[in-house]
Image (cartoon, grey):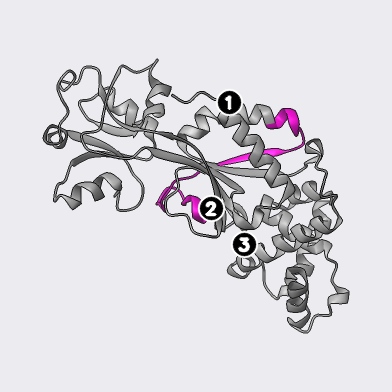
């Protein structure tokens, strides 16, 4: 149905005759969007750069739009192009489903780029195992990664935006308030802890709310306002902590508190990554907070994508094999 609707739309746009359109142009469109570079797009679908350039010229004529324009980051999509990405991807998926054997998927034949949005901890702790497993089972697959945050920020786009814009195919991260357009599977939970230097004068003393608020803090910034759940929690009680430093990553926060009298709050496993190289003291939070749940998240429209499903299952197996304390 989606394919017929798309063909009808194209047939009525600019009075273009659908019989004159090579549907392989859609493959070129999607390859350029995936790679953002004409040579790499051609390599992905077995065409020369000249052939890709010619196809892009034809696409521009069909859609009466530049579609992709050169920028410092490569071939960037125009607003019109962004509107076309999802319909064209779904059309290609539908065509693949029509001609594919629904009972068979050969991982060693997967010749594509698959991009995962991952939290800082996931990139360090899980990516090596995931890469090794996918390299072994699907040697022609190229894996890409993007640092994904739970909120829209000035340094990174949120997980949901990255999925909606097709910048990533899948996310492994803590994601808030997922809507019905997403599918997700909980992977594991871990608790948040307060961290300070082992030389901090608070070590050995109970960390009550008043003591906590009397200290300076390093915050892992989540957005332009530098706000976060801790500030939201304190504001409800008309309290405020003193932020001395904003940093974009947990590892930077931990490295800083290790050499100062400042405090920070991170996930427990993030601390363990630096345990051998930094002298840190860990203690419970001075207020109640539920454990963080890390989910594997993707667009629901990809549920029946055979390659996507296989990669999801492989990644889930890799993560379940890693010991999380």
The circle on residue 162 is: 2
- Helix, strand or loop for disc 1: loop
Q: Is residue 58 positioned above or below 173 on the image? A: below
Left or right of 87 on screen, residue 282:
left
| Residue that appears at 68% across and 28% down | 133
Q: Nearer the viewer, residue 300 or 96?
A: 300
Comparing labels 3 and 2, the label whose residue is closer to the camera = 2
Task: Report if residue 61 is visible in the image.
Answer: no
Q: Position of residue 50 (x, y in %)?
A: 82, 56
Magenta-colored span? 134-162
Q: Is residue 268 positioned above or below 96 on the image? A: above
Q: Is residue 49 positioned above or below 262 on the image? A: below
- Using a 10 Å C-alpha cutoff, classify the residue at mark 2 as few (fewer than 14 neighbours), some (14 to 19) or many (20 or more): many
The circle on residue 77 is: 3
**Which callout, 3 or 2, points at the residue further toward the start of the chain?**
3
Q: Is residue 101 magenta?
A: no
**Which callout, 1 or 3, points at the residue further toward the start of the chain?**
3
Callouts 1 and 2 close, C-beta under 8 Å? no
- Helix, strand or loop for disc 2: helix
| Residue that appears at 77% across and 60% down | 94
| Residue that appears at 25% across and 17% down | 198
Q: Which residue is mark 1?
A: 321
């Amino acid at each position: 149905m989606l394919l017929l609707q798309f063909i009808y739309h194209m047939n009525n746009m600019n009075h273009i005759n659908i019989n004159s359109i090579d549907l392989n142009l859609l493959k070129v469109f999607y390859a350029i969007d995936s790679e953002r570079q004409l040579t790499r797009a051609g390599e992905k679908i077995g065409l020369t750069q000249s052939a890709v350039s010619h196809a892009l010229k034809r696409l521009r004529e069909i859609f009466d739009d530049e579609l992709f324009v050169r920028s410092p980051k490569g071939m960037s999509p125009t607003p019109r192009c962004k509107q076309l990405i999802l319909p064209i991807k779904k059309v290609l998926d539908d065509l693949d489903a029509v001609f594919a054997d629904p009972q068979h998927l050969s991982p060693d034949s997967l010749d594509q780029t698959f991009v995962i949005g991952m939290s800082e901890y996931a990139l360090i702790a899980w990516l090596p195992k995931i890469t090794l497993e996918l390299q072994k089972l699907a040697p022609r697959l190229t894996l890409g990664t993007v640092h994904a945050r739970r909120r829209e920020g000035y340094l990174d786009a949120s997980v949901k935006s990255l999925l909606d814009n097709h910048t990533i195919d899948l996310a492994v991260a803590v994601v808030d308030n997922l809507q019905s357009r997403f599918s997700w599977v909980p992977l594991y939970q871990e608790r948040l802890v307060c961290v300070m230097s082992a030389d901090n004068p608070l070590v050995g003393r109970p960390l009550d709310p008043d003591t906590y608020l009397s200290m300076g803090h390093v915050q892992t910034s989540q957005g332009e306002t530098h706000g976060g759940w801790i500030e939201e929690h304190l504001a409800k009680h008309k309290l405020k902590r003193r932020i001395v430093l904003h940093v974009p990553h947990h590892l930077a926060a931990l490295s800083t508190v290790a050499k100062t009298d400042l405090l920070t709050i991170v996930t427990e496993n993030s601390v363990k990554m630096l345990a051998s190289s930094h002298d840190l003291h860990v203690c419970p939070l001075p207020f109640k907070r539920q454990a963080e749940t890390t989910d594997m998240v993707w667009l629901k429209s990809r549920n029946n994508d055979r390659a996507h499903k296989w990669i999801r299952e492989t990644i889930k197996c890799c993560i379940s094999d890693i010991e999380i304390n």
